[in-house]
Image (tube, rainbow, N blue to C red):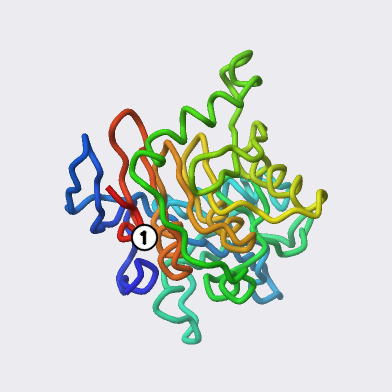
Amino acid sequence: MSILGQRRRRPGPSVRDRVTEFRDGARLVHEDRVVTEEPLELRVGWPGSPAQRVAVTMRTPGHDFELAAGWLVHEGVTVPEEVRAVRYCTDETLGDLEEFNVVTVDLATAPRTMPAARMVSSACGVCGTDTVQDVLSRAEAVPPVSLSAATVLALPDRLREEQPGFERTGGIHAAGLFEADGTAVVVREDVGRHNAVDKAVGSRILGRAPVPPVLVLSGRIGFELVQKAVVSGVGALVAVGAPTSLAVSLAREADLVLVGFTRGQRFVAYAGADRITD
């Protein structure tokens, strides 16, 4: 069962998970904690009008009411003094996975502006889907990808070799598409992880070329990055940072190899560990 389908109580900031750690040539299976990522639907209501959905943002649960109020003020929907109350939605139509993931903000007066309802990702990119099932329905059918542990360990350094922007500034992310043997095909940089992935995949699209099977990231792994990998037909995603709970869930549902904390002689496989050879 995926992480996405395990919870029936209020989500916390992290979840327990079973992972496979590769360290100094050894394979260790143990329990770990993964930061929680779940969607939060924001609704706004005011006198004479039922609550309306304005956005869905990917977030780590906690301080949800503060997040909702701050987002609405920052977006110009309202001002602080017009926020009357904030509450979790109790609609009977909400499913188990939606409970505590829908917040309604009651305003004293009508909104000053009312943006079109949209999806906002935790990394400031646009996530074009509300559910894992929507992503899977658009996934490219690709054969399973197998990687050697040695190749996985080498990928971050090979990515770094193709990062001139990082060498100059130290403040830019990278995404690279690689063959299963570790050969770099295309690497792109951007201040946003999601933008870097879009650039790398876009280069193949514009070049009318197939997308290589391995995506390597310089930072953490959020849901929207796994989404892009799945939709693009990538079979393995390797990163130097940690994944979120929803990223792990989608990777498992899509049968994607997902590896994080790839540093030195260590990495952690959150999905597809059986396709990593010693």
Q: Quadrant of residue 263?
A: top left
Q: Which residue is mark 1?
A: 272
Q: In the shown orientation, is residue 138 left or right of residue 99?
A: right
Where does residue 128 sit, x and y in percent of width and height?
67, 63
Is residue 40 positioned above or below 30 on the image? below
Q: Quadrant of the N terminus?
A: bottom left
Write the residue at 72% across / 42% down: 199
Q: 91 or 275, which is in the foreground? A: 275
Is any part of residue 209 visible from this angle?
A: yes
Residue 95, percent across and down? 44, 81
Q: Residue furthest bottom?
A: 93
Q: Nearer the viewer, residue 86 or 74?
A: 74
Up-down relation of residue 147 to residue 118 (above or below): above
The image quarter containing residue 133 is bottom right
State the image quarter where residue 22 is shown: top left
| Relative to 36, 200 lies left or right | right
Image: 266 above or below 115 = above
Residue 107 appears in the rendering: no
Kindly identify the residue that appears in the image at 46 percent across and 77 percent down: 90
Q: Residue at x 56, y 23 (%)?
A: 161
Give SS at disc 1: loop
Q: Residue at x 51, y 62 (%)?
A: 39
Count the numbered circles shown. Answer: 1
Image x and y of residue 54, in percent: 68, 63
Q: Residues within 10 Å of mark 1 (few under 14, many from 20)?
A: many
Is 244 on the left-hand or right-hand side of 86?
left
Front residue of 87/250: it is: 250
For the residue marked with disc 1, what is the amino acid? Answer: Gly
Q: Give how far across and how far down residue 253 sits, in percent.
A: 44, 70
